[in-house]
Amino acid sequence: MTADLHTLGGAYALDALTPDEHEQFKQHLATCASCRAELVELQATAARLSDVTWSAPPASLKRRLMDAVSRSSQERPVNVRLARGPWQRRAPMLLAAAAVLVVIASLGTSLVERHRISDLETQQSALAEVLTADDKTMLVRRLDDGGSVTMFVSASLDQAVMAMDELPPLDDKHSYQIWRIQRGGPVSEVVISRDQSTGAVTRLVDDVGDTEALAITVEPAGGSPQPTTEPIVTIAIT
Amino acid sequence: MLDPVPLRGLGGGGEPERLESLLNRVARGDEEAFSKLYDRISAAVFGMARRVVRDPARAEEVAQEVFLQVWQGANRFDAERGSAKTWILTLAHRRAVDAVRHDQASTDREQRLDWSGGPDYDSVQEEVGTRLEHEQVRRCLQNLTDLQREAITLAYFGGYTYVEVSSLLEANTATVKTRMRDGLIRLRDCLGVIR
């Protein structure tokens, strides 16, 4: 099995593995120093292939980027008052995911479909506000099956940002659903659609004052009126 | 007479600033460094993206996201794991491949089977300044076996998984995945890639 995994380095460097194998190989890399050393060289080699396809982009791309860059902040060290923990290495990435989302929303074009833009625009400033609030707290939960969920809560803003990073992919018969746990019981916050559920998903949650916790369950595709499975993660809002 | 000690990065002539050094300045929020970095590498990023996703507008979107990612995450660049160019092109290729797989789940993909006839990198318009690198890569690609070359170019420029490449080339998957690795190793040695 290990010998077999070792040979996947070439396909990995070419981004030619299936998603499952890609993850498998990534995990294998953590424990295989010779694979990492080889991969550095194979990735450098693959990058050289781009030498044969050089083509200057339209000048408008640079103008848009310079404009976006002058208006956007970069990743900064996370200012949290919690004890040091294994999540700290993860935090800048999640912040980056959120920051990229903010920047993308402020641009004229992006990979995101146009109809989502207006949604994002209304979220962007609120999202940034929570992430930079003086009183924000940050909680991170790693999931048993991979991926992690980070929650930033600002009591003064009465808002939370939930950032889901690399949740295990689901088949097309299931969706992730976020719930608010309130005194009256769980209330659906949102069903995460399949095309959103890969990579990082960031969700702004309003009016968290009387919410005791946020939880995520796996539900039949499209979501359920009430949770039908045990949560894969529950994060209490203190 | 040439100045025997070129003063790099001090504003005087000499060699252009290294990409790694530009990237370090970008990590500190230096917009001018970002602009220079863009000028140096955007044609590589955009050209590759255009080849992979085919549609120029889509390629522009991919390039835009890549450069925003570079701006936002320049502090994550780790020189131990390769050059700045490798880091940026690796990010870019991943994004281009994600885009093409997302877009072309079904029908369009079938229309791209003309790739099975072999890579047509000859037809790509090249820009000034890359001829030497271009020639070297082309020459080294010619040193590969047909199967190695086709497997690598279909994956890199076509965005195909090795499973898809296997069916396009009518070869078994284990062979294709092995050829991708030993082909890249041969290419590495031919190009003299150290890291």
Image: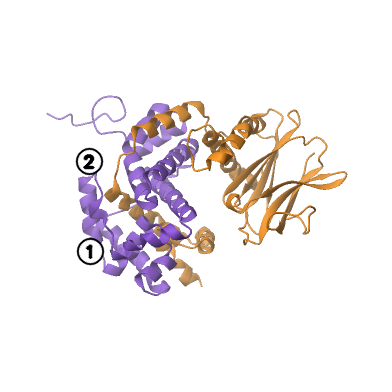
The answer to whether the residue labelled 2 contacts the one labelled 1, judged by CB atoms less than 8 Å apart, is no
Q: Determine the residue positioned at 33% across, 45% down.
A: B47
Which chain's residue wears label 1? B
Q: Chain of mark 2?
A: B
Asked if one can make out residue A96 in the rendered structure from this viewpoint, the answer is no
Is A48 situated left or right of A64 in this image? left
Label 2 environment density (alpha carbons within 10 Å; few <14, some 14–19, many ≥20) = few
- Give the residue at x 24% y 42%: B127
Q: Secondary structure at mark 2?
A: loop
Shown in orange, the chain is: A
Q: In 3D space, how far apart are the residues under numbered discs 2 and 1 (Cα atoms)?
A: 24 Å
Q: Is residue A81 above or below residue A5?
A: above
Q: Which mark is residue B129?
A: 2
Query: Which residue in the structure is indicated by mark 1?
Result: B143
Crowd around label 1: few <14 · some 14–19 · many ≥20 (10 Å): some
Quarter of the image where the N terminus of chain B is located = top left
Please name the residue shown 31% across and 66% down the image.
B148
Name which residue type carries label 1: Asn
Horizontal and vertical percent for residue A238? 80, 39
Give x and y (percent) for residue B89: 38, 47
Chain in purple (letter):
B
Residue B26 % position (x, y): 43, 32
